[in-house]
Amino acid sequence: GLGHLGIQFAAKMGYRAVALSSGPAKREDCMSFGAFAYLDASEVDQSAELQKMGGAKVLMLCAPTANVSGFINGMAYDGTLLVLADTGADTPINLFSLVDKRITIRGWPAGSTQDLEDCLAFAQHFGIKPLVQTFPLSQAQDAYDHRSSARYRAVIMPEM
């Protein structure tokens, strides 16, 4: 659910956002969100493709994956791996790959109240909107059960 917003924000900020995914299902959506390119891991070596583009200066990890070390190979010198989500599972990282490229890893929480206000103002100004799948309150358990498969966010709405 964070990735589709990340692409929109990055594109509106003038960055060349490259969407990384594990299949073709989100290609059309990502391109409509403003992605410069879409790299499907089932078709290409994402790290090699990122290197052909000059390497990722910032890689936002919105969906936790065991392939973090592989993504680091696609990063540019002095790049930043920005961790926005985690499953709690161990994630092995080759430490030399960080040293070799001077990669920085940063975790980022939701931010301060001012960060949130700035984010909402930016989103309103540029028309950035989340895509949500709504569930009535009576189906709260269904929303919880579908949180990882919702397209793109599961939202519980009060019943009218």
Image (spheres, grey):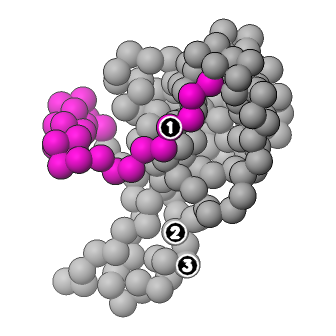
Magenta stretch: residue 33 in it?
Answer: no
> Residue 109: where, in percent of width, then height?
39, 50
The quadrant holding residue 125 is: top left
> Label 1 near label 3: C-beta < 8 Å?
no
| Residue 101 sits above or below residue 70 on the image | above
**From which residue to which does the magenta span run?**
103-128
Q: Of marks 2 and 1, which one's residue comes earlier in the chain?
A: 1
Magenta stretch: residue 110 in it?
Answer: yes
Mark 3 residue element: helix
* Residue 145: image tag: 3
Q: Give the alpha-carbon distance from disc 2 to disc 1, as whole Å.
A: 25 Å
> Residue 145: where, in percent of width, then height?
55, 78
Q: Give the alpha-carbon distance from disc 3 to disc 1, as whole Å.
A: 29 Å
The quadrant holding residue 79 is: top right
The residue lying at 55 percent from left, 72 percent from top is: 146
Residue on which the image places disc 1: 106
Residue on which the image places disc 2: 147
Asked whether residue 154 appears in the rendered view, the answer is yes
> Label 1 near label 2: C-beta < 8 Å?
no
The residue lying at 47 percent from left, 86 percent from top is: 141
* Residue 80: image tag: none
Amino acid under label 2?
A: Arg
Amino acid under label 1?
A: Arg
Instruction: Describe residue 17's horizontal placement relative to residue 96 as left or right.
Output: left
Amino acid under label 3?
A: Asp
